[in-house]
Amino acid sequence: MATVEVRRHAERAGPTEAGSALSTAGRAMAERLARTAPAYVVVASSPLPRAKETATIVGGRLDLADPALLPDLSQIVQVRTIEEYAPLLASGERERALADEQAGAWQRLGSAARDGTALVITHGGVIELASLRIAKAIGKDLRGNAFSYCEGVRVRYKDGKPTSLEVLRV
């Protein structure tokens, strides 16, 4: 059974924090998460520096900066709760396409991990929409706040199909 742990990147650096894509607090958060992280078979992130740096800290390395993990979010409304994403997914063609694309990317990375665990670091909005799509497919009710820094979901796959989804909070 493959497992994919999908998390939002850590807090990004402000304009005065040179030398890192993450803030001091963001690096510390990623380092805390790394202390309890499993051994990942695959470590992937979006190509943005804040995602790559988070993946490198949490996963101990970066195997792949995958452009598929950085969809165009410019037309996607960012909201405060997972429940507020549900109507966007139900009525928006762009949101459904993004959710399907991301769920497919997660499944592909899970297949690469085989019976191990893949770490995927991506962005807010992406995780909520794809998680809602997967939750619906497996008959799970998904609720709560939108994912903050380093939060996300753990999805388990059997024979390439999602079988469970667990919310990961910090």
Image: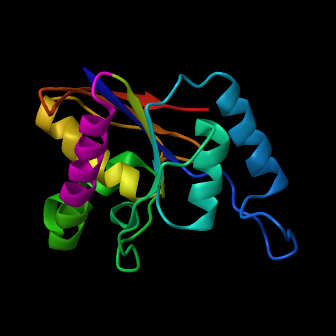
142 lies left or right of 122: left
In this view, the residue in front, 90 or 150, is 150
- Residue 149 visible in the displayed image: no
Give 78 or 105, whichever is nearer the viewer. Answer: 105
Quarter-of-image position of residue 154: top left
Instruction: Specify start and end residues of the magenta stretch as a single range.
Output: 99-115
Please identify the quadrant where the C terminus is shown: top right
Locate residue 95 relative to residue 59 in the image: left or right. Answer: left
Question: Of helix, strand and loop, which mostly describes the magenta segment?
Answer: helix
Residue 42 seen by the camera: yes
Q: Residue at x 38, y 67 (%)?
A: 67
Instruction: Report x, y in % for residue 34.
Output: 66, 31
Task: Tell which of 137 and 34 is nearer to you.
Answer: 34
Q: Residue at x 33, y 33 (%)?
A: 113
Residue 110 in magenta stretch = yes
Q: Position of residue 98 (x, y in %)?
A: 25, 64
**How was this image coloured?**
rainbow
Q: Quadrant of residue 51?
A: bottom right
Residue 132 location, x and y as percent?
A: 26, 45
In the rendered view, tell whether residue 121 sits above or below residue 46: above
Residue 138 within the magenta-colored segment of the rendering? no
